[in-house]
Image (cartoon, rainbow, N blue to C red):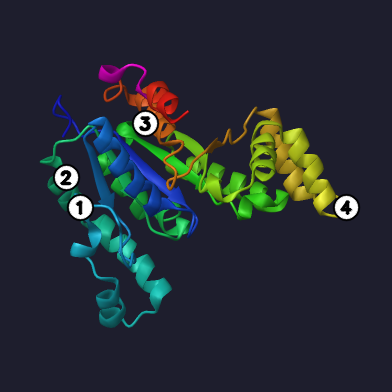
Amino acid sequence: MSQDGTMPPVLFVVGTAGAGKSSLVTAMQRWTRFLEVETLCVNLDPGAERVHYDPEFDVRDMISLSEVMTEYDLGPNGAQILAADLVAAQAHDIAEELDGLSGEIMIVDTPGQVELFAFREASSHMINVLGHERSAIIYLFDPMLSRSPSGFVSQMLLSSIVEFRLGLPCKNFLSKADLLDEDELEKILEWSERLEILEYALFEEAGGQRTEFAINQLRLMQQFAVSPGLTPLSSEMEEGLADVLTFAQALFGGMADSRDGFAADIEGEKN
């Protein structure tokens, strides 16, 4: 628990398969140790073959995906769905295990398939048990999918749906930004800030033909001043990690209050 006896803020790392969720949790654990921020890492993906961080709680110790497949005669997809529900059924047991731990922030690695976390009622139950009012989402945009206008729009919509479904504050990050060249990165970040430019790029991608559904969705986002506001992130280069902590501190206070200006200081050292 945090110093005041409550569950620390919880950041659920969400994104499509291969977006870099486990890599971010690993980087955050290593980086926050340097900052002397007490970070609790949790693995909620029973299908993870391996993780490279030291989890305070690992759902694989409770539920084995291979055993679920054997016991219920299910394939990998069906077993993942059932395992997610079995995890939620033991949410209070998980919360009790985490309750005795000391930490300033909790980082949760969610299942590889985003739909298993976003579209199952089991996830909402888990969030409520851990503390809905102390939870938020870190949503990772896949860099390769983000290179095309249609792929980028697809992720915008998915991020919005996840935020709507779970009802939590959400911040979008462009994961593995180091894999993109400078021009690609600049283009994607411009799309995230100026939806009219994204609309034109989408129109060009379609060969000048209108893509009514996507454009209507974009205009709806424009009407309500909604944009992903992407922040570049590289777990490999440890870039953007300060923005993750700053997001949590802005919502919940705490860890950064005693380290005023830490994000700027760290970024300054890198430059």
* Circle 4: residue type: Gln
* Circle 2: residue type: Leu
Residue 57 bears which disc, if any?
1
Q: Is residue 194 magenta?
A: no
Element type at marker 1?
Answer: strand
Location of residue 107 with respect to 142 vertically, above or below: above
Is 184 or 227 nearer to us in this picture?
A: 184
List x then y, in percent, for residue 63.
23, 66
**Image quadrant in which you'd find residue 133:** top left
Q: Is residue 259 magenta?
A: yes
**Image quadrant in which you'd find residue 207:** bottom right
Residue 98 bears which disc, if any?
2
Q: Is residue 119 left or right of residue 1?
A: right
C-alpha gap between disc 2 and disc 1: 7 Å
Secondary structure mostly seen in magenta is: helix
Which residue range is magenta in the image?
Answer: 257-262
